[in-house]
Amino acid sequence: MTDDDRFLRVAGSALADGTGATVRLRGVGLGGWMNMENFITGYPATETLMREAVRGVLGEERYHRFFDRLLTAFFGDADAAHLASLGLNCVRVPLNYRHFEDDLAPFKIIEDGFRHLDRLVDTCGRHGLYTVLDLHAAPGAQNHHWHSDNPAHLPAFWQHAHFQDRLVHLWQAIADRYAGHPWVAGHNLLNEPADPTGEIIGPFYARLVEAVREADPRHTIFLDGNTYSTRFDMFGEPAENAVYTCHDYALAGFVHGGPYPGRTEGVWVDRGQLEQTFLERTRYQRRTGTPIWVGEFGPVYTGDPERDAQRYQILRDQLDIYDVHDAGWSLWTYKDVGLQGLVHAGPESPYMRRFGEFQAKKDRLGADHWGSTGEGVRHLTDPIHAFMDEEFPGFDPYPFGRRKFTNDLVRHLLFAQPLTVEYAELFRGLDDGELDALADSFAFDACVHREPLVDILTEHTRPV
C-alpha cells in the first residue's frame, strides 16, 4: 500500500482508505501527555496552575528538564508497539494550545511545541497506528472544567472573538504541518465544547472547518457535539468529509456510580439503558448517514474487586453495542496513576512513592472531579448544597445543574487550587537523577498492565 492509499476519507457511513477498504478506528486516548489532567498523573487543579507552582520550586531550567523528560517517557516506541500488538489501530492525541502559543504572544506559533508531537505521529505510523489530533484545551477554555485547563468555571472561549481567532490561526498551523502525513487520520478540532447558548458553535465550526481545509484539504475533520460532545441538534447538514464525534461515558461507570446493573443518581442503568443513551447521542450521525465514532468512553476503576468486575461488564456491554452499530471508538485513557489506564505507574515506582500520600489527601478532600467522590468532606459540602437548594431552588446552571456547579466551585476550585502548592513542594530538594526517576515512572517498561482491560479490548479488535 502506498502512502497515498493510507489517507482516510469518509465514504458514506464509514471511513475508508485510498484502496476503498473500510477502516474502523479503534484505539485509545493519550490523556495526560500534551494535555495533562489532574486525575491522570495525580496533581491537583489545572495543568497551568500546577506547572506554575512546580516552576516556582524547581526554577526555569530544571522545570523544563523534568517536563521534557516526562513527555519523552510517557509515550515512546514500546507504547506504540504494545497498542499495535493488541490489534488497536488509532491513538487520539489531546493537545493543550499552550504548547504551541503563549498567551503573552498570541498568534505567534512556538515551533518547539511540535517536537514531541512530530515524534509521536511518526512513531505511531511506524507501528501502523493512525493518530487523531485533538485540540483539548483552547485559548479561553471551551468548557467549564480542568481538562480544558480552565482555572475558573466559565468557558470564556465562547464570549471573546479574540480566543476564537487564535484557535483558527493555531489550527491552520497544525493542519498545514501535517497535511502530507498519511498516518494522521484527521483533525479533532475542539474537545467537548460547551457553548452555553448553543448558538455560537455552529457558525464557528463552519468558519473553523473552512480555515482548516484551506491549509489541509485532504484530511478528515472530527467534530465534537456541544455539551461535552453529547448534543448535535444545533447542526444542519454535515460538512463534507467530516465525522461527528460523540462521547459516551456510562453513568454507572463514574467514580460515584453503580452498582451495575442498578441505580445511579436515580437512573436505572443496565445494558438497555447504555444502548438507549448511545442511540440518543448518535441520532444525528445515523440520520445523516455519517460515520459513528465514540471519541471517549470508559469506566473508572475503584480497586474494589466486586465493583471493578461490574465496571468491566459495563465496558464489555458498551463495546458489544459499538460492534452492533459498526461504531469506531477511542477508550479513555491509555496511561495514568491507576484510575482508568490500560497501563499505569506501579505502586512502588519513584513517582507513586513520592506522591502517594498526597494523592490520598487529594482524594480525601474530594478535590478531583473525576477520581474522587467527596465523601470525606460531606460534613462541609452537604450544608452548602442544602443552603443552595433552599435559597436558590430555581437556579439550574448549564451544563449539569446546581449540585455539580456547587461542587465545581467548592471542591474542585476552592479546595484543589491551594493543593498545587503542596504538590509542588514535594519536588523541593530533589536532584536531577531523582527528577528523572519520577518522570521515568511512566515509561512503558516501568508500568503495570491492567490485564482484565487488555483482555476485554482484544476481544473486540478482531479484523472487521
Image (cartoon, helix red, strand yellow):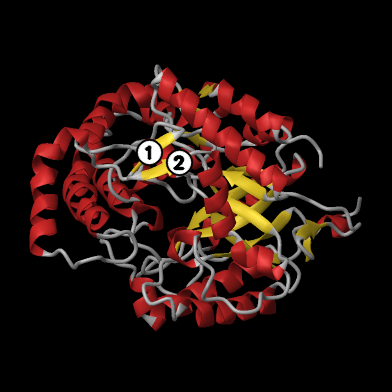
> Taking 252 as reference, is 231 above or below it?
below
Q: Where in the figure is residue 412, as x and y percent of width and height?
A: 24, 49
Pick whichever, 102 or 320, lies toward us: 320
Q: Residue at x 42, y 74 (%)?
A: 106
Q: Where in the figure is residue 350, as x and y percent of width and height?
A: 38, 22
- Based on the displayed image, in which of its 4 quarters is residue 389 positioned? bottom left
Q: Where in the figure is residue 446, as x and y percent of width and height?
A: 52, 22
Disc 1 is placed on an element classified as strand
Q: Where in the figure is residue 383, as x and y percent of width and height?
A: 8, 47
> Taking 188 as reference, is 288 above or below it?
below
Q: Amino acid at mark 1?
A: Arg
Q: Amino acid at mark 2?
A: Val
- Based on the displayed image, in which of its 4 quarters is residue 429 positioned? top left
Q: Residue at x 52, y 52 (%)?
A: 277
Q: Residues under labels 1 and 2: Cα distance?
A: 6 Å
Pick whichever, 109 or 19, lies toward us: 19
Contact (CB < 8 A) between labels 1 and 2?
yes
- Tag 2: Cα neighbours inside 10 Å, few (<14), some, or many (≥20)? many
Q: Dot 1 corresponds to which residue?
A: 263
- Tag 1: Cα neighbours inside 10 Å, few (<14), some, or many (≥20)? some
Q: Tell how many labels.
A: 2
Residue 30 seen in render: no
> Is 170 positioned to the left or the right of 159 in the image?
right
Of the numbered discs 1 and 2, the one sitting upstream in the chain is: 1
